[in-house]
Image (tube, rainbow, N blue to C red):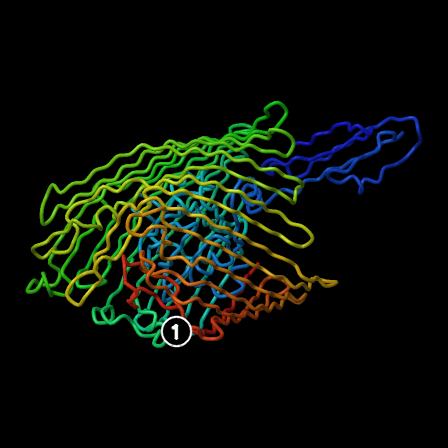
């Protein structure tokens, strides 16, 4: 903490505390002021932060400036507010007031974020600013850089989803678009950082149980404590659901935990461990008519083939060590080992994937003064790579029909290998140019490597691509008051293709058992985007807001399209390609308002999030200026909640979305939808017991949540859509032993 004392033009002493990193808990400052006018004792209660003290006092005027030490969550929120672009923080305590089944529940009410679950499974669709716009669900996610506790989960193969259990988190930080720069983000959508609880913000014992419609059950037992210089936290969860759509039964179980140790005031370290298994039947895609009239039926081919996806056991082990070199600088070191096997039985073939990644992270952060103004510099290096020989996909006969007719089940028909690496060296600086005007600048040097090889049924079908690229960034923010800020930035992002995308497109084998499977990798260029952003955030008179407008010119956008759907005798064929130039622009608006506050803690709160998305081609040869399929142009979420002083709360909520195109020709659209929900709950005054009832889709609307785009359906209603869940009631109870 730094306290600056200056004499103003009116002969007053101005005491202005400036807090850096929350490193000091209490600072007492006493000023002896001598004057000749009169004797006076100053009332120290009036000399709070920013108070002006008359300079003509004869006796001692005690000015006490007290700075409450910021919690880790508050420091993170402050850091997000210092980014000159769209950011947000999700408090898990708010999320846990209702059902917490998937990360759709975590990312709800966040402007700019489109997050939709299908069949209650973990493989939700997440898109920010049009990232991964036309990917369906149950893919490795792309377009958003995912982290646990500031360390990478995403890698050259994209982001597997099975480890993202939403219980056990303290908070979730969202940095939209290029605002994820300081994390080494290589994506159009930005970065999401899921932060686990530690012994410092957990209860010695916590249990939670949820149950509800369509066979849903979820259980959690967790514990965290501080024991001297050591602390720990762990959370065990398991869940099951029959699913709304037939043939969407799913189960999961997992562990998330960490333990930390403070060697002294300058060195601390923390180890993390996550393990989780998931197994989900996949109900498949339906037509718009089927969703409207028969939304619980599965796709006929998926049902006949008993399609499913299993993650038999994924492990994420990491360490993060922080070394305070002196009062103004620190070094953060991170290392990750990530093992994520997958077993997909989604058609006539069985695909077994194996990936093992290692990541290292080094970041140096220093606070200085330049010409009397604060300046913070960050230098970081992030490297993520597949372990050599441990990236593979093997395809086996599952249903011996078509090109595999007559072969025994389990016969190997293709063996493919993957190698990949992402290296990002990034430098950034935040400097206060004049009072309250901050300049942010940065530059990333990026080296990526992608390599695939089909080893069977042929050999030497190798594809290799190494790329160097760069991403500069410059931004300004101005704080009119501590509660009102405007900002703007111009940034470049670079997003390489995932290695599986390189080997999921034609050319394909045309003869033999591997007919229809990709035979060699194809050259996909890095997707790049230049983004201009303007925005504001702050709070005033019980209203807290955020508002951003962004405009991105995207080159070589990574697009996917289903070329041939799955049949009873053949697997689906999806093509990955670089599209022509596109524009992604939109508005992200969030507003939380206390509409009424009683004499005690009673209050009425309205929370709103609106996202406008305009994503379209720029004079494409085939599709002119068509909009891109997969995301609604207008998306709104709102919740009105009343909190009683005895811990009872009641709310109503709504979700509104416009239609979505389902093909690149814009020949067919989903229907818009408008759904309602409600919640009733209670948190005990001592913060021990809590319970809730959560009502979803009160009017039982049948609508599309996610589409899997086609090239051109010529206006025909094809099976491109995943159905929403119908009306459901969910309840939960939890107990914290404090």
- Is 679 displayed left or right of 15 in the figure? left
- Is 547 displayed left or right of 61 in the figure? left
Let me know if residue 729 appears in the view: yes
In the picture shown, does residue 605 fall above or below 325? below
Picture coordinates of residue 73, whole percent (x, y): 55, 47
**Which residue in the rendered view is the most extreme toward the right?**
38
Give the labeled residue for mark 1.
Answer: 215
Number of callouts? 1
Tell me the element at label 1: loop
Q: What residue is rendered at 45% in x and 37% in y?
A: 491
**For residue 348, what is the image quadrant?**
bottom left
- Along the viewing direction, whichever of 293 and 691 lies nearer the viewer: 293
Picture coordinates of residue 69, whole percent (x, y): 63, 42
Picture coordinates of residue 499, whole percent (x, y): 26, 45
- Along the viewing direction, whichever of 406 and 673 lies nearer the viewer: 673
Q: What residue is rendered at 66% in x and 40% in y?
A: 480
Let me know if residue 281 appears in the view: no
- Is 524 displayed left or right of 329 in the figure? left
**Which residue in the rendered view is the most extreme toward the top?**
371
């Amino acid at each position: 903490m730094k306290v600056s004392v200056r004499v103003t033009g009116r002969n007053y002493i101005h005491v202005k505390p400036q807090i850096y990193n929350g490193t000091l808990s209490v600072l007492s400052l006493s000023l002896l002021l001598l004057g000749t006018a009169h004797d006076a004792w100053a009332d120290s209660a009036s000399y709070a932060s920013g108070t002006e003290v008359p300079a003509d006092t004869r006796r001692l005027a005690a000015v006490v400036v007290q700075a409450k030490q910021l919690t880790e969550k508050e420091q993170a929120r402050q850091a997000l507010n210092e980014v000159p672009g769209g950011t947000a923080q999700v408090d898990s305590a708010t999320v846990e007031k209702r059902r917490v089944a998937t990360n759709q529940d975590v990312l709800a009410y966040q402007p700019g974020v489109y997050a939709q679950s299908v069949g209650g499974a973990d493989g939700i669709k997440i898109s920010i600013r049009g990232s991964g716009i036309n990917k369906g669900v149950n893919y490795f996610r792309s377009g958003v850089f995912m982290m646990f506790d500031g360390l990478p989960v995403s890698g050259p193969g994209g982001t597997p989803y099975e480890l993202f259990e939403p219980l056990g988190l303290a908070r979730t930080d969202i940095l939209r678009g290029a605002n994820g720069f300081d994390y080494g983000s290589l994506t159009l959508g930005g970065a999401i950082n899921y932060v686990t609880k530690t012994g410092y913000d957990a209860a010695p014992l916590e249990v939670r149980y949820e149950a509800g419609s369509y066979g849903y059950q979820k259980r959690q037992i967790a514990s965290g404590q501080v024991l001297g210089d050591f602390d720990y936290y762990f959370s065990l969860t398991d869940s099951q659901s029959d699913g709304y759509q037939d043939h969407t039964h799913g189960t999961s179980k997992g562990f998330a935990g960490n333990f930390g140790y403070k060697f002294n005031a300058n060195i601390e370290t923390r180890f993390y461990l996550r393990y989780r298994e998931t197994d989900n039947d996949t109900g498949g895609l339906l037509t718009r008519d089927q969703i409207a009239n028969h939304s619980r039926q599965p796709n006929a081919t998926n049902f006949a083939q008993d399609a499913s996806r299993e993650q038999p056991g994924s492990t994420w082990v990491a360490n993060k060590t922080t070394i305070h070199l002196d009062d103004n600088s620190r070094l953060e070191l991170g290392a990750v080992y990530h093992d994520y096997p997958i077993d997909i039985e989604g058609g006539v073939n069985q695909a077994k994937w194996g990936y093992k990644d290692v990541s290292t992270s080094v970041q140096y952060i220093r606070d200085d003064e330049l010409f009397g103004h604060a300046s913070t510099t960050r230098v970081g290096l992030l490297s993520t790579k597949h372990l050599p020989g441990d990236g593979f996909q093997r395809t086996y006969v599952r249903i011996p029909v078509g090109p595999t007719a007559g072969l025994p089940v389990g016969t190997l028909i293709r063996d493919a290998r993957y190698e990949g690496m992402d290296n990002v060296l990034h430098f950034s600086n935040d400097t206060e140019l004049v009072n309250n005007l901050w300049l942010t600048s940065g530059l990333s040097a990026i080296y990526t490597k992608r390599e695939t090889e089909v080893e069977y049924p042929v050999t030497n079908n190798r594809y290799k691509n190494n790329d160097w690229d760069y991403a500069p960034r410059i931004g300004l923010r101005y704080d009119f008051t501590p509660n009102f800020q405007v900002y703007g930035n111009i940034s470049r992002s670079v997003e390489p293709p995932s290695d599986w995308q390189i080997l999921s497109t034609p050319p394909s084998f045309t003869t033999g058992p591997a007919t229809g499977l990709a035979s060699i990798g194809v050259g996909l260029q890095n997707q790049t985007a230049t983004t201009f952003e303007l925005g504001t955030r702050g709070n005033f008179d019980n209203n807290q807001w955020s508002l951003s407008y962004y405009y991105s010119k995207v080159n070589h956008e990574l697009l996917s399209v289903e070329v041939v759907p799955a049949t009873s005798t053949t697997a689906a064929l999806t093509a990955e390609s670089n599209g022509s130039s596109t524009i992604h622009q939109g508005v992200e608006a969030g507003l939380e308002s206390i509409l009424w506050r009683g004499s005690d803690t009673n209050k009425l709160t309205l929370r709103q999030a609106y996202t406008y998305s305009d994503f379209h081609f720029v004079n494409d040869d085939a599709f002119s200026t068509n909009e891109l399929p997969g995301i609604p142009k207008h998306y709104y979420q709102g919740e009105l909640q009343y909190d009683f002083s005895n811990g009872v709360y009641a709310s109503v909520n709504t979700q509104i979305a416009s239609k979505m195109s389902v093909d690149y020709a814009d020949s067919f659209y989903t229907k818009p939808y408008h759904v309602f929900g409600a919640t009733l709950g209670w948190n005990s005054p001592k913060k021990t017991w809590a319970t809730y009832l959560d009502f979803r889709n009160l009017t039982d609307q049948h609508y599309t949540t996610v589409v899997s785009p086609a090239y051109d359906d010529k206006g025909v209603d094809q099976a491109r859509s995943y159905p929403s869940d119908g009306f459901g009631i969910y309840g939960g109870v939890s107990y914290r032993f404090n």
